[in-house]
Image: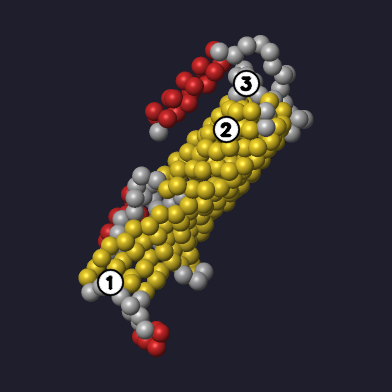
Amino acid sequence: MKKILFMMVMFSFLVYAQRDDKYFDAPFGGGGGYLGGWIMPDMGALNSQLKLTGYPELSTSGIYTSGGGGFAYIGVLPYLRIGGMGFAGSTSEKIDVGNAGSNEAIYSIGGGGVTIEYTMPFIKKVGVSLGAIIGGGGFTIDLYKNRGEVNWNDLQNSSMNKLTLDNSYWFFTPTLNFDIPVYRFINFRAGISYQLPFAEDWEVDDGVELRNAPSDVNGKALYIQAGLYIGLFSF
């Protein structure tokens, strides 16, 4: 994470050093489009719990997400832009447990909210902005015990088992974003952020309250995103 932040800061200074003095008094415009991302929750505590109960451990390298977003400069306050974004993704693992059976864990995460960003006025031609996302989201853990083929007439006596754990929350996410105009109407956007959840609410299966969930199994996550926006951009 430190290496990524260092590279982004160095990129900002290089852009600043190469700028000229022909620019608008303030950036304007806006647009929206697709955002792909890579979210990295801390899976360590969750994997410890899964291992204890016989389920497979989930990947710790991150989860690809798909989503979208957009923003617009509001004009009344120079360099301030308001917008929104959303994302979702999932990962899964399965292990064999013998007798033609398997245990499977599926982790799904998503969210969305309002974006507030301030574009650095001393960097021209590209937009480098600090801001935050304020919104809500959550993650779901689906746990399956599959025990081979099942006959329709034997469904009532089936040994198949499923457990769903759901954690929903509000979040505040500080962001650092870069917007590079590819063309007047196309903008390449990349950013890094860190999701900070609060007011978490755990449920199991059909909305039943789940108590005493481990505090270190939560929605904190590093999030990297990139995509193309279509609109009108001038930085």
Q: Would residue 104 be visible to someone looking at this image?
A: yes
Q: Is residue 113 left or right of residue 48?
A: right
Q: Nearer the viewer, residue 54 or 101?
A: 101
Q: Which element carries disc 3, helix, strand or loop?
A: loop
Q: Tag 1 or tag 2, which sits nearer the N-term?
A: 1
How many discs mark residues in the rendered view? 3
Does 142 appear above or below 91?
Answer: below
**Disc 3 residue type (three-letter):** Lys
Q: Quadrant of residue 15?
A: top right
Q: Which residue position holds label 3? A: 125
**Disc 1 residue type (three-letter):** Gly
Q: Position of residue 177 (x, y in %)?
A: 55, 32
* Numbered mark located on residue 24 in the image: none
Q: Which element carries disc 2, helix, strand or loop?
A: strand
Q: Nearer the viewer, residue 34 or 46?
A: 34
Q: Nearer the viewer, residue 225 or 81?
A: 225
Q: Tag 3 or tag 1, which sits nearer the N-term?
A: 1
Q: Which residue position holds label 2? A: 188
Q: CA distance from mark 1 to mark 3?
A: 58 Å
Q: Which element carries disc 1, helix, strand or loop?
A: strand
Does 9 appear above or below 36?
Answer: above
